[in-house]
Image: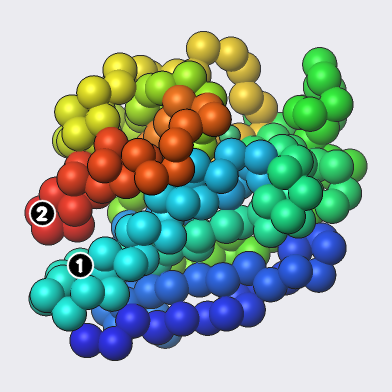
Amino acid sequence: MDIKHLPQWALSAGQRPIELYHNPNCHGANLKSPLVFIGGVHGDEPEGVRLALDLIEYLKLPENSALNRPWAVIPCLNPDGFKHNSRVNKNGVDLNRNFPASNWSAEYSKKRYFPGPSPGSEPEVKALVELILNLKPQVIFHFHSWEPCVVLTGEPALKHAQCLSQSSGYELKNNIGYPTPGSLSHYAWVDHKIPVICTEEQEHSDLNKTWSNFGPGLIKILKY
Ligand SMILES: [Zn+2]
């Protein structure tokens, strides 16, 4: 089974390509609620990009071609930030505060949380919103790094979140512990009833370790 690779699925604010990989069961009009995995929402969190890339390598292995479950992986949503080791995109926007969620707010406490001039203003967010509305994912996973934990937003994905918590040994939480207006999790779950799981690797980790923490859980989820 060939994996489809869109090397320029979308363009960032800085005109960098955003890549997307998916399996043949996840495309076109005949959609089956894929699992969607996203790395690099924050450009200074390379652990999540590495985890997404390792997941793609795993999915490319011939012995895993029998995984029929529809999935899509965006290894790095914020290539501008990733290039410059910066949380925000080229426009200085925290993408995880820019979603057109019902709780989007123009207010922000620190520059690093700048939510943009208007909800959904950023091309990276626009592209992901379109994908969410078109594909209606079963669950969205996004990979970050900060303090180790797994954050579940949306009870229907409890089993998946427990899987990742057990695999990594990181605590499972129901919220990150501070307000996140305009976040992906609020937009997808509260506004569209699509559960979201955020994984937080220990920041500044050895990049080789993230897959061993979360990989076994991700594989189990893909094999359900
Ligand atoms: Zn982050």
Q: Residue at x 61, y 56 (%)?
A: 77
- Within the image, what quadrant is residue 212 found in? top left
Q: Are marks 1 and 2 in contact (CB under 8 Å)?
A: yes
Front residue (pair 200, 176): 200
Q: Is residue 92 left or right of residue 54?
A: right
The quarter of the picture where the C terminus appears is bottom left
Q: Residue at x 30, y 22 (%)?
A: 170
Position above or below: 61 against 13: below
- Within the image, what quadrant is residue 149 found in? top left
Q: Amino acid at mark 1?
A: Arg
Q: Is residue 106 left or right of residue 176?
A: right
Residue 69: image tag: 1
Disc 1 secondary structure class: loop
Which residue matches tag 2? Answer: 224
Front residue (pair 178, 201): 201
Q: Earlier in the sequence, mark 1 or mark 2?
A: 1
* Image region (quadrant) for ligand 1: top right
Q: Position of residue 99 (x, y in %)?
A: 66, 44
Position above or below: 209 against 59: above
Most extreme residue toward the top, as rendered? Answer: 177
